[in-house]
Image: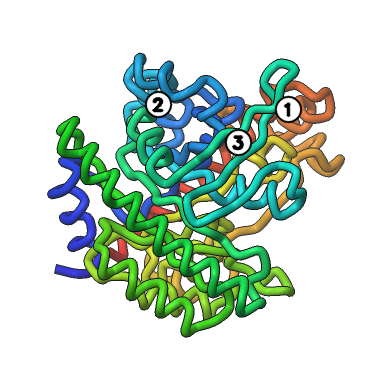
Amino acid sequence: MNKIKVAEKYIYDKLGKTVKLPIYSPDATRGYVRGLTSADLAYCGVESIVVNTFHLIYFPGGDILKRVGGIQGYYNWPGLVISDSGGFQMLSMIYQDSGFGTISNSGIVIKRKVGKKIDNFKFTPQKCIEMQFKLGADIIYCIDDCPRDANNREDVKNSVDRTIKWAKLCKETFDRLVTQTGRKALLFAVIQGGSFKNERVRCADSLKEIGFDGYGFGGWPLDKDNNLDTEIFGLTAELMEEGKPKFALGVGNPQAIVEGYKMGYNMFDCVLPTRDGRHGKLFMMREDLDSTNILLKSSVADQIYIRDESFTRNFNEMIDGYSFAFVNHLFRRSEPLGMRLASMYNLKQYMKLIGFLRELA
């Protein structure tokens, strides 16, 4: 049995759900994919979504989501739900402006305005896991500390120390809630370490000793020139346990997905297909692409801007029965239908790409 099939079996045995790998998940940050219904996602072949715990804490709130059966009931979504801890968003806010809150070994304190008062909300590892249980997530993430500067050794060392400490607390809370509720869920941890290989190794070894159901790549996957940092990205995949899911968090342009797959990653997510779709950017898988040559291609997708004047008379190429010319017209009139059609087109292209990779598994 190959590595991907072993990971699929591991998920089924632990979760009781069939999950095909590799898999791509669009970001449903606030509990939904912007401009699309859950039926739209299913029509495009999407099988899983990623929601953000930080954003959902505030609105609609964990208690409301728990009452309706989590994201599945709230968004009427029948597929897999993966919850990001939200730590990256909180830390980014604080790094940019310390007035947003503070960071310590016990967690993150976010200052938020409630009416005319400032409320200090403490987001601990324990609360992070408790909230994700309320979301009804199938795959839950430990909160991790992404370093302010991936090239600063002291920042990275402190980040790894805190990531390990928080992961232990998350695991304890997760195990307790699984016992109390009887729910089936998977707990993933994030491997940090910035650009330092020894710190990546230290973080991975410590997390594997604690024991998790899967692991995600932590940090920014691109180098200073905005190219995929293949050295650190590849090393992190090698450090993850074989036979378990390997998540390339935030990696999602088509070529990066292929490169990540070649390195051993089998789960991907990003905002690109829907965010870019809303701005009129379409990803088009190359016509000569198939499962026999996909790993050999240096470029698997072309990009066009459907807003461009050149498409005003293009009646040959279609998006769900509508010509490029018509979709161009919708965008030039700022019609939301154009954004919806473009987002769905991109998602179907991504699912086509994943389909080719699955044929290799």
Q: CA distance from mark 2 to mark 1?
A: 34 Å
Answer above or below: position of 313 versus 241.
above
Q: Amino acid at mark 3?
A: Ser
Q: Nearer the viewer, mark 3 or mark 1?
A: 3
Residue linked to disc 3 = 343
Crowd band around label 1 with a 10 angstrom C-alpha radius: few (<14), some (14–19), many (20+): some
Q: CA distance from mark 3 to mark 1?
A: 15 Å
Q: Amino acid at mark 1?
A: Phe
Residue under the point 20% across and 40% down: 17
Q: Nearer the viewer, mark 3 or mark 2?
A: 2
Q: CA distance from mark 3 to mark 2?
A: 21 Å
Say whether residue 26 is visible: yes
Q: Verify CB contact (< 8 Å) between mark 2 and mark 1.
A: no
Residue under the point 40% across and 61% down: 165
Say whether residue 348 is visible: no
- Which percent across, then down, holds residue 134? 36, 28
